[in-house]
Image: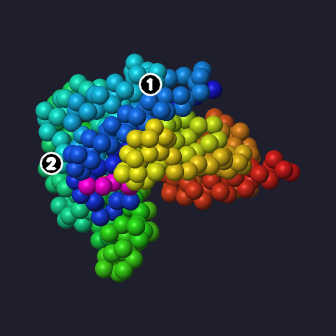
Amino acid sequence: MTVMNGLYLHIPFCVKKCSYCDFYSVPYTRPLAERFIGALETEIGLRSHFFPDGHGSVSTLFFGGGTPSLLAPGTIASILDSIRDGFSVDGGAEITLETNPGTLTPGKAEALLAAGVTRFSIGVQSFERDELVLLDRIHTAEEAEAAVKAVRDAGCRNIGIDLIFGLPGQTAARWRNTLEKALLLEPDHISAYALTWDSGTVLGRAILGGTRPAPREERVADMFMAADTILGAAGYRHYEVSNYAKPGHVCAHNLLYWQGGQYLGLGPSAHSFSGNRRSWNISDVSRYIDVLSQHQLPMEGGETLAEEERRLERLALALRTDTGAGLDLIPASSPVLERLSAENLGSLRNGRFVLSAAGFLLADEIALLLSEEDKKSRTG
Ligand code: SF4
């Protein structure tokens, strides 16, 4: 089996915190960003032997965050140079930059492409003004449209946008409107995420405290199915629970995660995975910089997955995709498989069990059920 290698770079700066966000990020200041870039370059050098010899080259790089599009194109170019010095990178590697529409101009889009970015993932989230206010986004719907147009006019032919649904007070009609406006922009890839909330975010606390209505589960499920229908009819392949792509535009970096590839995460809070070993970096940019100034790895922790845990994880990730799980992970026949098929939640196709859109909604629960069946069939 070919092992795919990916690099994830966490750029931990934002203009301001969005109300629903639980990613690690701090307010952008130039002096801190400059110190961070120095530390990141050190980490790149220290980690250049992460992928075992003979395990191929890096085929995907993903600048995430945070807001990587806050960095100057020259900085992105110099980070990419350091990566190419430390790692073997495929000539045709997918290089994605997460982009906040409030941080992009046509000139910057051109310069980022010239720096080596091949794919933009633009955080549009909604085309409804009051939803963008609720989410505390720094941009308007018009600015989001302008950002998509800017990267396309600059020559990018691999553009993804992110949308979010299941917001407090959001109606089915408003979600449909956002999907239809998204289609008018003709992106190559659309990620549609259901809002998740907990006490760690401003919006989560508002929902838990009762000042914002909790999105109703059945309504969120209807919005998920509406996205499947509307985007499917427009020619997008629903290739993972939250992701849709035009032919030839599946995100290779995402696929690497779901297909069990190995990846190295650089930057504060970034996670890495290789073999059965997962590790993660310090979630604090100042400590991250301090540790690297002593030429030490900025790792916070790690764990080795037991064989059964890894098997369940592989199954759960495979079931999230439209290529499903192979019969090496689940029994070829069982009462559970038959019931799932009878309820149109999934079906066996060419020796793989593939979930339907309705099955995607229950992917985690189904993974647990099938994992139990699998264990039973192996232990008799
Ligand atoms: S721009 Fe992205 S990373 Fe930054 S606060 Fe908003 S959602 Fe979080």
Q: Can you identify the residue that label 2 sits on?
A: 143
User: How many angstroms separate mark 2 from mark 1 (CA)?
Assistant: 37 Å
Tell me which corner region of the image, top left, top right, bottom left or bottom right, holds residue 185.
top left
- Point out the residue furthest to the bottom here: 210
Numbered label attached to residue 86: 1
Element under label 1? helix
Frontmost residue, 106 versus 318: 106
Q: Main secondary structure of the magenta part?
A: loop
The one of 68 and 48 positioned closer to us in this rendering: 48
Q: Position of residue 204 (x, y in %)?
A: 37, 70
Q: Which mark is residue 377?
A: none
- The stretch in magenta equals 23-27
Q: What kind of element bears circle 2?
A: helix
Name the image colouring: rainbow
Task: Determine whether, in the image, residue 92 is placed left or right of residue 78.
Answer: right
Q: Closer to the camera, 51 or 207?
A: 51
- Disc 1: CA contacts within 10 A as few (<14), some (14-19) or many (>=20): some
Q: In this view of the protein, can residue 302 be seen by the observer? A: yes
Residue 82: x %, y % from top left: 37, 26
Q: Amino acid at mark 2?
A: Glu
User: Can you give x and y, in whole percent of width and height, for residue 248 in the image?
Assistant: 39, 29
* Callout 2: CB less than 8 Å from ligand 1: no
